[in-house]
Image (cartoon, rainbow, N blue to C red):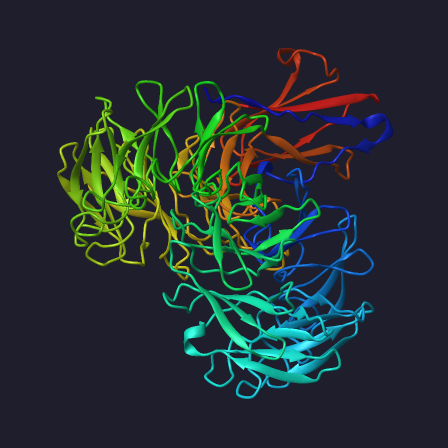
């Protein structure tokens, strides 16, 4: 039960004998981040490299808390550590220097924005020691190679004097020298693959475009910059080669093409140092397709590699190929996240091969036995787009849209103390990408929806989650009965659930449905634009036995509608928005005790279209209560809730930036509004404490507000937060005549009581009541108290009421 009587937990002590005052910063409420969802490192770019310490190092171009990529370490035992996420899109692959440090490049950043060269010491400290300026190179996509002269060499698809790419040298001291600028027709352009050191000490590489027919070239360049074009790729050779070539035991170079060959599914090719080119293997699908990674030479003189697709499950393969083109499939992947390897392998000191799939790091023996070492996925889940449900056990339950063992979302339990337990990872067939909160059923189970997944893994599901941890799909949408449900279900007196699908249905504009606890679904309404379209939130059970809801589009003006529907499916449009009074109501409605409905529009209104808050009677009379102006929020996209004070509480997904306030970043707000339209901004998100709330709030048993953000937090994957609604003193000062001026605030309006005592341990009933007054419109108060006649301690306390 929510507590309506609140007593200030902060007691102000005033040591008048020493004339010292303890001042508190002025704040109405406090936002506390309780949990940070951690984004995984992302999809690994390029092969891993084994460091002198025996650990493996790799890069991701994107991913990590800031989404700008990471450099990470994986031990042979499978312990993953993100070493740094404060980089700008690391290029694919790293290299060990002669000093034992790890070297790499970024595809962006630096003084000119064209990338940097960095070194990583054994403690994980990253130092940028060279900068690309757009002429000596620009936006490299692949890693460096260490040549025999002790310098590093690399390529970039941009930069050079023609802005068509460059080959450059980087000394350990950080001097960058451009060796060649590509010109397209003569020597090629856009080299995205790295270089390979040949047995002659020269460097060999490829361009992605240019040459005789525009499909790219293979070239040789000396460390001093003497350039020779060895081959121009022809039409049948394929178009995309993103991985560097590998030097074979026979002194020739071997590489892969993502496409081309007899089936256009990719090839393996060989080129001699003199330029004799041969396509050795054409992938056909059954033996793999779309090879993206570089090949790795084994101790047996054969080459090992991966395909991203193909094989029995079309999720990629690991293969071995001889230098004359004899290919053997060693392993076929059969899991989406544990398959589809986007890069090749590294041969480790233990004789095994190590590589990455889309969601894991694995070890493979030369005989093809594969072991998953560690997941690269955020197993707790990320991007909670749904609100929390306060369960009967006092814990909160919710969902994340992404993450989990299949990266398709999770269902979790969260304690008020901050402990999170992932209970279910969605797998596609039982649903994926849940975007709505859970609701309790009459049987003690939880019920919810997913916006994707199901029998065909696309249109979404309705599921039941039992208290023993079992998740059971009840309904799989199939487009004809709707698709993409984003709604929280609502239950009638008979135990049936009602909800909306945001799209599809007979008219492709969404539906309203009823589902019995045995899973039988009945489509009640198929929206047809004129009566609304694309309902993104669910229904509200009205006090009159009907249901009320909104559509994000459609209606007579095309800006969305408010409707009433009977349990049998008779729909009546109560109101059609016209933009001036709001547009695109993305969130649903909440009903007051007097029957009035309250809601939000994501856009529209009189302040440049930042959204509105409104109330509407059940006969369709709408009143705009508030129009957002961005500084107080933008795009409120979810349902508000009533607080114990009778006010409404909600979130705006964007906005909150205040002129002259560097902390105002426009990443969303939390607000309160009274039923007569008095608006109070309670908190704003700044990224570090979360960003973009997209779900309703909930009151906990402690009387505080709890909610989620889709983005932000220290992990970058969203947050769970609490708004502390405890009343508090905000200031205390001595006036000119020696009196004490007390100021305070509370999130709730109404009446407050101010008490004093000379003994902190005195029961509250024995304290002296100084005033019983009403907070002003901003829920604040000031009170002047005459100090004690004799020096001593005096304590103050606020209570409501």
Nearest the camera: 257 or 387? 257
Q: Is residue 687 visible?
A: no
Q: Position of residue 267 (x, y in %)?
A: 46, 65
Based on the displayed image, in which of its 4 quarters is residue 162 positioned? bottom right
User: Residue at position x 43%, y 67% from top?
Assistant: 259
Q: Residue 163, located in which quarter of the rendered image?
A: bottom right
Name the quadrant of the N terminus.
top left
Q: How many marks?
A: 0
Taking the image as drawn, is residue 465 in sight?
yes
Which percent across, then down, holds residue 589?
32, 39
Q: Is residue 429 left or right of residue 507?
A: right
Q: Which x, y percent locates residue 469?
A: 42, 23
Q: 215 or 108: nearer the eye?
A: 215
Residue 202 placement (x, y as % from top left): 71, 75
Q: Quadrant of residue 74?
A: top right
Q: Residue furthest right?
A: 18
| Above/below status of 311 relative to 159 | above
Tell me what residue is drawn at x 66 percent, y 58 percent.
Answer: 87
- Relative to the observer, which residue lies in front, 740 or 421? 421
Residue 451 in the image: above or below residue 795? below
Q: Nearer the viewer, residue 61 or 368?
A: 368
List the single residue furthest toward the bottom.
Answer: 186
């Amino acid at each position: 039960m929510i507590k309506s009587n609140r007593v200030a937990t902060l007691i102000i002590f005033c040591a008048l004998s020493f004339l010292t005052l303890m001042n508190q910063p002025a704040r109405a409420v406090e936002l506390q981040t309780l949990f940070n969802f951690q984004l995984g490192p992302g999809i690994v770019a390029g092969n891993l490299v084994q460091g002198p310490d025996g650990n493996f190092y790799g890069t991701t171009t994107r991913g990590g808390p800031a989404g700008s990529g990471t450099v990470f370490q994986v031990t042979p035992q499978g312990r993953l550590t993100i070493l740094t996420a404060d980089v700008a899109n690391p290029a694919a692959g790293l290299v060990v220097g002669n000093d034992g440090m790890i070297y790499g490049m970024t595809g962006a950043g630096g003084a000119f924005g064209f990338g940097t060269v960095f070194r990583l010491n054994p403690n994980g400290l990253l130092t940028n020691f060279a900068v690309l300026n757009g002429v000596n190179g620009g936006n490299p996509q692949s890693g460096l190679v260490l040549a025999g002269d002790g310098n590093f060499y690399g390529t970039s698809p941009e930069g050079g004097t023609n802005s068509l790419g460059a080959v450059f040298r980087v000394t350990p001291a950080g001097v960058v020298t451009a060796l060649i600028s590509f010109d397209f027709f003569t020597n090629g352009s856009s080299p995205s693959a790295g270089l390979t050191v040949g047995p002659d000490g020269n460097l060999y590489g490829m361009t992605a475009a240019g040459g005789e027919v525009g499909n790219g070239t293979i070239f040789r360049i000396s460390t001093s910059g003497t350039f020779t074009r060895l081959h121009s790729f022809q039409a049948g050779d394929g178009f995309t080669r993103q991985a560097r070539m590998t030097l074979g035991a026979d002194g020739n170079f071997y590489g892969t093409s993502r496409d081309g060959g007899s089936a256009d599914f990719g090839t393996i090719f060989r080129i001699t140092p003199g330029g004799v080119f041969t396509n050795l293997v054409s992938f056909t699908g059954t033996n793999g397709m779309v090879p993206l990674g570089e090949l790795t030479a084994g101790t047996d003189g054969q080459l090992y590699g991966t395909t991203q697709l193909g094989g029995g499950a079309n999720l990629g393969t690991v293969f071995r190929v001889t230098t004359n083109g004899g290919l053997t499939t060693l392993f076929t992947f059969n899991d989406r996240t544990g398959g589809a390897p986007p890069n090749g392998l590294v041969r480790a000191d233990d004789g095994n091969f190590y590589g990455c799939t889309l969601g894991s790091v694995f070890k493979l023996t030369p005989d093809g036995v594969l072991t998953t070492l560690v997941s690269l996925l955020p197993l707790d889940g990320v991007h909670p787009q749904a609100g929390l449900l306060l369960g009967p056990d006092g814990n909160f339950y919710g969902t994340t849209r992404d993450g989990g063992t299949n990266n398709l979302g999770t269902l979790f339990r969260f304690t008020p103390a901050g402990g999170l337990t992932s209970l279910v990872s969605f797998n596609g067939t039982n649903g994926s990408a849940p975007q709505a909160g859970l609701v309790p059923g009459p049987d003690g189970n939880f019920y919810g929806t997913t916006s994707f997944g199901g029998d065909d893994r696309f249109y979404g599901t309705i599921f039941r989650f039992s208290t023993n941890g079992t998740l059971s799909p009840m309904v799989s949408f199939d487009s004809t009965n709707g698709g993409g449900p984003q709604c929280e279900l609502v239950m009638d007196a008979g135990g049936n659930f009602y909800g909306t699908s945001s799209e599809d249905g007979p008219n492709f504009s969404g539906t309203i449905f009823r589902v019995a606890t045995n899973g039988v679904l009945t489509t009640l309404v198929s929206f047809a634009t004129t009566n609304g379209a694309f309902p993104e939130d669910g229904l509200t059970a009205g006090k009159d036995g009907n249901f009320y809801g909104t559509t994000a589009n459609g209606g007579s003006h095309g800006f969305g509608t408010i409707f009433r529907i009977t349990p049998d499916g008779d729909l009546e449009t109560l109101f059609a928005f016209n933009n001036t009074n709001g547009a695109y109501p993305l969130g649903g409605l909440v009903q007051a005790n007097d029957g009035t409905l309250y809601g939000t529009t994501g856009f529209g209104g009189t302040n440049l279209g930042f959204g509105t808050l409104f109330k509407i009677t059940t006969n369709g009379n709408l009143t705009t209560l508030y129009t957002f102006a961005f500084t107080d929020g933008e795009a409120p996209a979810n349902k508000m809730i009533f607080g114990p004070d009778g006010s409404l509480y909600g979130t705006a997904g964007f906005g909150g930036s205040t002129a002259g306030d560097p902390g105002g970043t426009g990443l969303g707000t939390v607000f309160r509004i009274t039923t007569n339209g008095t608006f109070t901004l309670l908190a704003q998100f700044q990224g570090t404490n979360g960003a973009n709330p997209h779900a309703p709030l909930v009151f906990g048993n402690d009387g505080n507000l709890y909610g989620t953000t889709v983005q932000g937090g220290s992990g970058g994957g969203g947050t769970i937060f609490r708004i502390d609604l405890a009343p508090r003193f905000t200031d205390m000062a001595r006036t000119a005549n020696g009196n004490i001026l007390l100021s305070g605030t509370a999130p709730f309006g109404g009446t407050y009581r101010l008490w004093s005592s000379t003994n902190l341990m005195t029961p509250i009933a024995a304290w002296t009541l100084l005033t019983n007054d009403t907070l002003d419109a901003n829920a604040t108060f000031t009170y002047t108290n005459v100090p004690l006649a004799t020096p001593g301690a005096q304590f103050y306390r606020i209570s409501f009421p």
